Image (cartoon, rainbow, N blue to C red):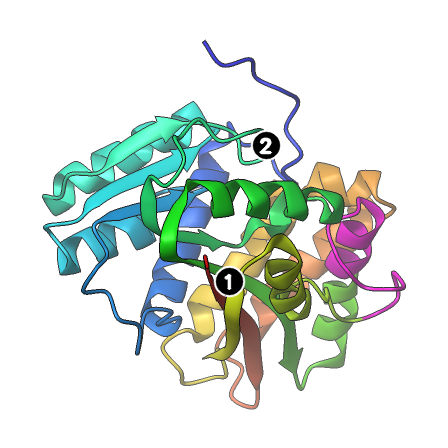
Amino acid sequence: MLQRKKSTYFANEGDVREKMRLERQAKILDKTLDVLSGLDLSSVHDVLGIACGTGSWLIYFAQQHPKCHVVGLDNDRGILAFARAQASVAGVSIDFQEGNALEPLKFDDASFDLINMRMLMGFMHRDKWHALLSECLRILRPGGSVILTEIEDGATNDYQYEAYGQIMYTAFHRVGHTFASDERQAHLCTAIALKRLLREAGFVNVEHRSHDVDFSYGEEAHAPVLENFVSAFENGAQFFVKMGATPKQIHEAQAHIKSLINKPDFLGFWHFISAIGYKP
């Protein structure tokens, strides 16, 4: 049996509310972050999703590539049960396994052709990336690829929204999950570090792609993205307070973000970067 370690995730992984938030967030990102566009998948047979969460991306992949063997890895048993149920409803076969991305991976050398990881910043300390990517290099077959996708920042025309967003940036910096040089930066700097991290781990032909989720008023993602941030403040309140915010600030942030839903002059973009590297 796996020895479970204290979680480094910013919210309570056992919280049903957080599972539902992650599933809603995944649906938003699945529609916008087309990380496979232009990639040659003809020789891809075995696919792994690390820290797969609710399994949304893997389910989408399995539906598009039914002949592939798809594996999902996550350390949260509850969320894996949810992912298995979702896969069953979608009619796809995915091997969901319990495992921790912060520990040596339990797969044999050269087991996979493609590894996908998205939004690890919620639990990944900046000093842990090298070990994880070295493990990815080990379990990939020669020519296999890894895709990393992380949020970089958000930009809106609402000053108060930006100020409340800084609560998150500061908290993640203080816990060591960002690559920013100062906690006052309105950037996480994790996404822009991905290319360098892949190269340092031994990957070659590294490239990156930018993605933007437009959640301005009138866009499909408008209400879902704002509601996602409200839920993130609620589910991660204990973490944000521990990192220096006050309960009053958390409450005010939720109330203000809610007030922006359906505000006609609101403009907002959520910026992500994907980095793709190949095993020599």
Can you identify the residue that label 2 sits on?
12
Can you identify the residue that label 1 sits on?
149
| Mark 2 touches mark 1? (CB < 8 Å) | no
Q: Residue at x 53, y 40 (%)?
A: 135
Seen from the viewer's position, the closer of residues 105 and 125 is 105
Seen from the viewer's position, the closer of residues 141 and 245 is 141
Mark found first going from the N terminus, 2 or 1: 2
| Count of marks, rendered view | 2
Which secondary structure lies at badge 1?
strand
Q: Position of residue 150 (x, y in %)?
A: 56, 62
Q: Position of residue 168 (x, y in %)?
A: 73, 57
Q: Residue at x 38, y 30 (%)?
A: 108
Q: Which contiguous range is marked in magenta?
A: 167-185
Crowding at label 2, few (<14), some or many (≥20) Cα neighbours within 10 Å? some
Q: Is residue 57 above or below residue 95?
A: below
* Figure quadrant of residue 83: top left
